[in-house]
Amino acid sequence: MKREELIDMISSWQNLDLLSRHITDHPEYLGLLVEVALDDSKPEYWRAAWMVDKINVRDQELIKPFLPALFRALKKTRNLSKMRHFLKIITFHQIPAKQQGFLFDFCMTTYTSQSVPVAVRAHALQILYQIAQDEPELKPELTQIVEHELSQGQAAGIRARGKKILSLLYREN
């Protein structure tokens, strides 16, 4: 399969699930799919990120080698749909120590931004919690931020995830 063929196939929603299953079974095409997912030249390439997310749910080991590229992509993409999928993918994996500083700052900014969609913010909060598990000294700061955000009248999805994370943080302290 060539890049042009893949791009043509992802242009139709009917193909996406079948194609993501095919690539799960034939991971030799995964690099090409990730390449398209990382390409910000066309907004519709977020569909490739959706497919990478679905493949990750099926088999996280297939995606693990591409995590460094996803971390780099977060630094530059402005496509919130891609950001949602990249953050969700990251929640399934152990976060490398060398990425924790960047991700903590990035996710803190994302989580506290009212202009970012709820799903993106919820995944960012999950990553913040995962990093706090590795770096327990961050738990008090995270607890304060979540409490503050919940006091600001958040959307239902943020309230639900925030309450869940707070419950876990309270139990751990």
Image (cartoon, rainbow, N blue to C red):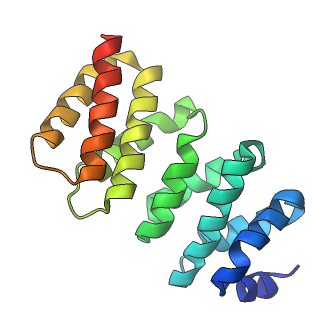
Front-most of 118 and 37?
118
Question: Image height check: is 161 above or below 36?
Answer: above
User: In the image, 68: left or right of 128?
Assistant: right
Front-most of 12 and 31?
12
Residue 118 falls in image quadrant: bottom left
Front-most of 56 and 18?
18
At 58% from the left and 50% from the top, the residue drawn is 89
Question: Image height check: is 14 above or below 146?
Answer: below
Front-most of 155 and 39?
155
User: In the image, 115: left or right of 99?
Assistant: left
At 29% from the left and 42% from the top, the residue drawn is 160
Residue 100, horizontal then vertical, whole percent: 47, 35
Query: Split into 4 quadrants, where in the image is the C terminus?
Result: top left
Residue 18 falls in image quadrant: bottom right
Residue 150 falls in image quadrant: top left
> Is residue 66 at least partly visible in the picture?
no
User: In the image, 118: left or right of 151?
Assistant: right
